[in-house]
Image: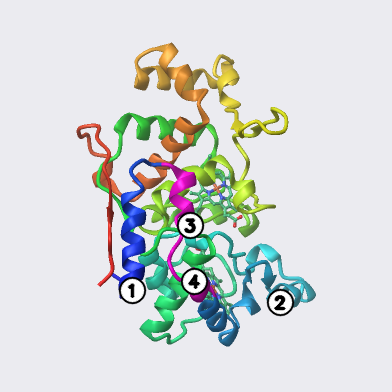
Amino acid sequence: MPQFSLSSGEIEAVQTAILGMQKEDMADALKVKVAGARGAIQAGRRIVKDFNCQGCHILEDKGGQIREAMTANKIDLALAPPIIRGEGAKVQSDWLFAFLNAPRSGQIRPWLKARMPTFTFNSDQLNGLTSYFAALDKARYPFENRIEALDQRSRAAGAKTFEALKCAQCHPTSQDAFALALRGGKTPADLAPILAAAHSRLRYEWIADWIKRPEEWMPGTRMPTNFPKLDDGPGKPEKRISPLAPALDTPAFAGLKKDLVGIWGSEAEAKAYIGDPDRVTKALRDHVWSLGNDFLTAPQAPKKRAAAVVAAH
Ligand code: HEC
Ligand code: HEC
């Protein structure tokens, strides 16, 4: 566990936030303010400047000079360090802490040419950066949801939907799969983060939200928008649609339909699932979460418990 240095006032604000967060509501969950966020952002920006993180990364929409050097040397920009956006909302604070401390321990894109350097940060700097990223996104900090069990039907439906949407065309699902993909003719430009360690790296709620609206999290991302917005006119609440719903009756998706009917028990239930972008994105999330996480795929009572734990000490 990271050593989060919170004042008692900050701990109280965090605890109040937990108490106000009973249901799994993405919009609310991401909007909880961390006390002292402005100070955390200022302190983080100082570290980012001192260590020239923006020489490699586009961060807060600035920097990434390495890209100019790569372009000048005709190196494919698909090999550039990742653009960092929404990081605080995306990753678990303790993953981020451990990664910044020892970047080699957590490679997510092993095909990149530039490597994240190992800075010898002290724990104040590691805490400073971790809370900086959380504060930028108004993300819950420093506690995480502990997911101890998955709804097995949702996970199984997610696995079938993952296949139908060909997610693995870009995402290796294990550390070995990317080498295989490269040997099979893919280039780094075709590849996306390895999903095997998603459960120890990403925030559970974030994954479903990202799959639902990647173009809002990271404008210009190669991750496809599988659930486009329905343009319902100004002032209407945002609504997204699931293009798989009308496709389910076509011959190309007969296999998926059969699998989903098997999982949900009837055609009506299968259609109710596939037509609901929230259910489908959560099911995909549950499948992603189970990758490399075998105990979660074992049959068990379909209960899901998301216990918030304060990790401050
Ligand atoms: C020499 C280039 C370089 C510098 C300088 C650099 N990084 Fe990185 N960083 C990388 C690369 C390459 C990756 C991708 C690692 C991977 O995906 O396996 C990365 C990944 C990251 C990630 C994880 C992104 C994700 O996908 O979740 C974070 C956070 C990060 N860097 C923060 C920083 C911070 C903060 C600094 C400054 C203290 C910094 N980096 C400096 C190259 C760099
Ligand atoms: C055309 C390639 C492509 C396809 C297909 C694709 N993705 Fe992605 N995905 C990406 C890229 C690229 C990123 C990294 C975000 C970025 O840097 O823009 C990403 C990021 C992610 C992440 C975050 C991973 C991390 O560790 O940071 C998850 C989770 C994810 N995608 C799930 C999915 C799922 C589920 C599907 C299928 C419905 C899917 N993706 C299909 C390209 C793709």
Q: Position of residue 186 (x, y in %)?
A: 61, 52
**247 over 141 or under it: above or below:** above
**Quadrant in the rendering for residue 78:** bottom right
Q: Which residue is mark 3?
A: 89
Whether residue 26 appears in magenta in the rendering, the answer is yes
Q: Which residue is mark 1?
A: 4
| Residue plotted at (61% across, 33% down) | 237
- The magenta-colored residue range is 25-41
Q: Main secondary structure of the magenta part?
A: helix
Q: Residues within 10 Å of mark 4 (few under 14, many from 20)?
A: many
- Which of the image's four quarters has the C terminus? bottom left
Q: Which mark is residue 65?
A: 2
Amino acid type assigned to the residue bearing label 3 in the image: Ala
Tell me the mark number nearer the camera, choosing from 3 and 2: 3
Tag 4 secondary structure: helix
Tag 3 secondary structure: helix
Q: Is residue 232 left or right of residue 46?
A: right
| Colour theme | rainbow
Q: Is residue 165 left or right of residue 21?
A: right
Q: Position of residue 63 (x, y in %)?
A: 68, 74
**Quadrant in the rendering for residue 59:** bottom right
Whether residue 6 appears in magenta in the rendering, the answer is no
CB-based contact (under 8 Å), mark 1 and mark 2: no
